[in-house]
Image (spheres, rainbow, N blue to C red):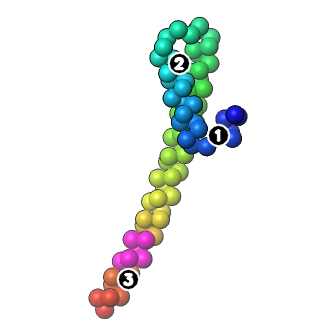
Amino acid sequence: MAKDKMNFEQRLERLKAVVDSLERGDLPLDKALTLYKEGLGLSAELGRTLDTAKNEVKLVQDGLLKEFAALEAEAEA
């Protein structure tokens, strides 16, 4: 499956497979280097996805907190 078609979970599983392969230590240098580069790319993509999700959650929470504070202020008035 092409990397750009993978969802977060598929990318994470691929990263785990890359790490497992590298940790075995039985790969030729060129294959290990290729996998290492792939792993760095996957890690960066996963990090960006997590940052985006974190920001979306924060925006939603801030909006809900503001709405709640407004409702609370109305109830007190």
Q: Position of residue 23 (x, y in %)?
A: 47, 17
- Rendered image: mark on residue 68: none
| SS assignment at label 2 | helix
Query: Left or right: 51 with respect to 69?
Result: right
Question: In the image, which residues are magenta?
Answer: 64-69
Mark 2 or mark 1, which has the lower sequence index?
1
- Residue 45 visible here: no
Tag 3 and tag 1, C-beta contact below 8 Å: no
- Rendered image: mark on residue 21: 2
| SS assignment at label 3 | helix
3 vs 1, front mark: 1
**Residue that carries the numbered disc 3 in the rendered image:** 71
Q: Which quarter of the image is occupied by the C terminus? A: bottom left
Q: Which of 9 and 68 is in front in this view?
A: 9
Q: Which quarter of the image is occupied by the N terminus? A: top right
Mark 3 or mark 1, which has the lower sequence index?
1
Q: Is residue 66 above or below residue 9?
A: below
Q: Label 3 amino acid?
A: Leu
- Rendered image: mark on residue 6: 1
Q: Label 2 amino acid?
A: Ser
Tag 2 and tag 1, C-beta contact below 8 Å: no
Mark 3 or mark 2, which has the lower sequence index?
2
| SS assignment at label 1 | loop
Q: Label 1 amino acid?
A: Met
3 vs 2, front mark: 2
